[in-house]
Image: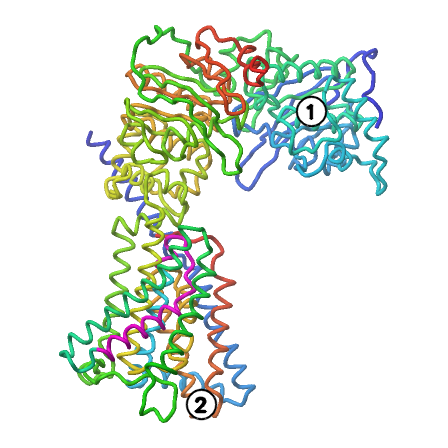
Amino acid sequence: MTSERLVLTRSRAWDVARSAHRAVSWTRVGIVAGAYVLCLVAFAAFAAWRGANPLTLIPTMLQSSLLEPSALAQTLLRAVPIGFAALAVAVPARAGLVNVGGEGQLIIGAVAGAGVGIAVGAHVPGVVGVLLTVTAGTLAGGLWAAISGMLKVAFGAAESVTTLLMNFIANDIMLFLIYQPWKDPNGSGQPQSRPLAASIRLQPLLGTGVTLAVVLLVVVTVGLWFVIRRTGWGFALRVVGGNPMAAMRNGLPTRRLSLSAMTVGGALAGLGGVLNLIGVEGQLRPDLTATFGYVGFLACFLGRNDPIRVALAAILFSAIALSGNGMQISEGLDGSIVNVLLGAIVLTMLTVGRRTKEALT
Amino acid sequence: MSAPNDSRAEPHDTPALEVRDLVKTFGPVRANDGISFTVMPGEVHALLGENGAGKSTLVKSLYGVHRPDSGEILRDGKVQHLDSPSVARRSGIGMVFQDMRLIPALSVWENIALHLESTSGVLRPRQLRALIAETSERYGLATHPLRKVEHLSIGEWQRVELVKVLLGGLRLLILDEPTSVLTPQEVAGLFAMVRRLTAEGVAVIIITHKLREVRQIADRVTVLRGGRTVLMNASPHALTDAELITAMVGEPVETLQRAVTPPVTGAHALVRLNGVSVRRPDGDWGLRDLDLEIRPGEILGVAGLAGSGQNELADLLVGADGIADGEVVVDGEAVALPDPVRMRRAGIVGVAPDPVRQFVVPGMTVAEHTALWNSAGMFAFDVRHADADLRRRDAMAELRVVASSRRMDRLSGGNIQRALLTLALTSDARVVVASYPTRGLDVLTTERTRTLLRRLSEAGAAVVLISEDLDELLALSDRVAVLAVGRLAGILPGGTADRNTIGELMTGVEAA
């Protein structure tokens, strides 16, 4: 009995050691790090060709995105919509669904939040107003994505297509509202909604420049990480995503699971949209989301559907986007040049990425 | 395109084929590790061995698919280098693969034309079709040159493959497990053709793991194990079954003897199918008007040609498939299907017909599969205790399941099957629906699995055994139900069922 137990323990320790070994492969780390360096070098070369100084380039970029406290705050604030949009892709991906609708779900979350926010205005205490606004945005995002989810489970319509098309509808709804019923009378003719009452806007925390939205992104990210790894729902999503037929044969409610994954994804993006509205924008306007939804999709890809890595990727993309400001000021280049770096990173990760299909653990 | 040589008159001193010390490695794996044997003209030589013994690797070297690392292949006493299958074909070697290589969208004669070396740009359909008809008739291989391959039965499909190789001026024919998908009648037809070929001096190598076939057709036998020759050029008549199995496995194996169990009378059925019909996704009937009783303490064998409704029956019983007509009664109560949870709670578990598609979840470990299995539709997944549970089950089943931390999708087919069997056969089930339970298993694990199924039925469980292996069905079943194109062609008592009767029922001869 004792010797049996000994053998058992040893073999389990061996298994653990092996899986740990598999988790950290130094060759892989080297390849990925090398790929990032290569991207930076290529980008620096490109910027030098456009007239920038390659030696001061990187410090300038770091300065204008991460090193300056106010720049860091900007980076984190912008990481909120990108991060939530990325998580909105990561959750359905567990169930094998491709959500390309982050952009539309961000918009519809902001629209619903704006509607409730304008309606309740200063009639209720600030905390209640914020809670109502945020709840409305989250629910709207979830319902918006659930439409695609329903089309998927009821008719088998490809969710990758329907979510994408829903983005255009969401954008048109917002444009209609800001050109017509919700148009700001004091906006000097600009198509924008009336601004939200100050009581509903998020204030910077203790002079740091970041708002509660950033804290919420961190909390939700860690929470999702736990939910996906440790709950029955997360486990069941992995089964459905890995092999729907096996899920069905084991009695899992595959349709409901797919629908729930899609809805939760949409709700996350809706939350991101409304947080961006009450934290940064304050009113609806065209190009409110500035393709954060699509950037989030790429961030999710870069983070391999793991919530924590996905959020980090969102911060990286946000930092790259903001570093364009520094380029514009000190190097006299167009800020959008940083899109070259962003594109290079995504393309490189596409090539060095999924050599072997990674585990959905 | 000459007919096989009639070289019977010469004394057969020089072997048609001699293999000397053949070695073929794949990375660290020595698939063939010094194999030698000889085949005389006009002889049927059986290559016997378990899965992974190196039989397929060996014949692929003979057909020019693989290049051996070392060793020699001699044809009629001369060393020959077979660099590619087309070189092998030109020198008169023909091979019929296990997975048959025809193009379904083309007709029979077009498939044959594609294969012929002499087909150069211009096809001469009429001439070719005449040649096909002549060859078919000569060897008793009924084929229809104008029919599309996709409409052929598996037996016809194989006959087309044979005509294809016969047209090429055949001296040495290699058959890779040719009988595994055939009815007994079709096996008899195949063997008659083999005898006609050997009478014309053609040498035939037949790969098999069925002893009965070795005895039926082979003049000599060579046994492979772990890539080595363990028994060379032996006469099967001088050996007992036990000796041949011991050579294959490396240790004596007790094969399960048919136990005579008293017929179960009056026992009330656990599951009853009343006039059940099932539609396939393509709209055809998968099952049609099926009446069947599944009784406790009984092994109900299900025989049929591939695709006769066995998989639909298996899916139906585990609740994975709905029915178009009729009713499924479980414990006296009609159930609405599909409902896997309902069937599982009624104590019905299944060994899936296609484990890779129906059981394996990519990215998940064996332990996680165990947790999923144990959840039984309850939406609670205990991964933490899955390892201990799997070990408990392994101690009961003794099927040597792999470590629970391994990823299921990275296991071999045999190891996946072991994991699935370990879970299914230790679940205190009242009904076990076992589809092809021993497919891909070695001889020892196969015997162990059969023993477990027998024990389950002795303990009062109902076992539905779906199998392509008639010997397995006859050895285990109390009753054998035969399906033909989704209909029940007949039910025979297992003890007295006769292979030929089953074969006739399978092809619907009596039903028609």
Residue A191 versus residue A337: which sits nearer the camera? A191
- Residue B276, numbered label: none
Tell me the quarter of the picture where residue B509 sits.
top right
- Left or right of residue A185, residue A333 in this image: right
Tell me the quarter of the picture where residue B4 sits.
top right
Q: Same chain, marks 1 and 2? A: no
User: Residue drawn 43% across and 27% down?
Assistant: B313
- Residue A328, numbered label: 2
In three-dimensional space, the C-alpha distance between marks 1 and 2, rounded to whole angstroms, equals 75 Å
Q: Is residue B108 above or below residue B511?
A: below
Residue A292: give x, y in percent of width and height: 39, 74
Report the span colored magenta: A91-119
Label 1's element?
helix
Q: Is residue B102 above or below residue B48?
A: below
Q: Is residue A359 magenta?
A: no
Chain at tag 1: B
Residue A327: give x, y in percent of width and height: 44, 88
- In this rendering, the count of numbered labels is 2
Q: Amino acid at mark 2?
A: Gln
Label 2's element?
helix
User: Residue drawn 19% across and 72% down?
Assistant: A131
Q: For mark 1, what is the residue?
A: B159
